Image (tube, helix red, strand yellow):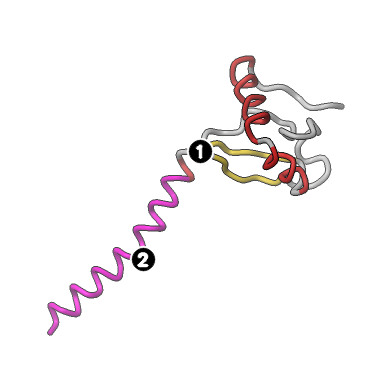
Amino acid sequence: MMKKISAFLLVLLSATTLPLWAAGKKQAALKPYPLDVCLVSDEKLGEMDDPYVFAYKGQEIKLCCKPCAKDFKKDPAKYLKKLETAAKTGPKSGKK
């Protein structure tokens, strides 16, 4: 009986911690966001409020606000291309 309980607890522990561990692995694998401006509006991040941060296909994305996410979602390829260009030329600063 004790072996069954131990086996059950081991399975339960594995089932609950493995997804958390995998989520941590995915988060660590994100490419860092190279700009200090919003990918959509080119506004300097943090001037309005805290940036809206999310992951898209392994890339960390930072926007000045959540409404900019609607524009990003309409044409993500356009904005990812902008990130690729920034990675080649180096980070840029926002408007002053």
Query: Residue sitting at 41 percent across and 57 percent down?
Result: 20
Circle 1 residue: 58
Queried whether the magenta region covers residue 59, the answer comes back as no
Query: Residue sitting at 74 percent across and 49 percent down?
Result: 66
Q: Amino acid at mark 2?
A: Thr
Residue lying farthest to the top in this orientation = 89
| Mark 2 or 1: the one toward you | 1
> Above or below — where is 31 with respect to 55?
above
Graded by Cα atoms within 10 Å as few (under 14), some (14 to 19) or many (20 or more), the crowding at tag 2 reads: few
Return the residue nearer the eye: 49 or 86: 86
> Above or below — where is 78 with respect to 30?
above
Of the numbered discs 2 and 1, the one sitting upstream in the chain is 2
Return the residue nearer the eye: 77 or 66: 77
Prevalent SS, magenta region: helix
The label number, if any, that marks residue 16 in the structure image: 2
User: Which x, y percent locates residue 89?
Assistant: 64, 14
Q: Which residues are magenta?
A: 1-26
User: Which x, y percent locates residue 63?
Assistant: 72, 40
Give SS at disc 2: helix
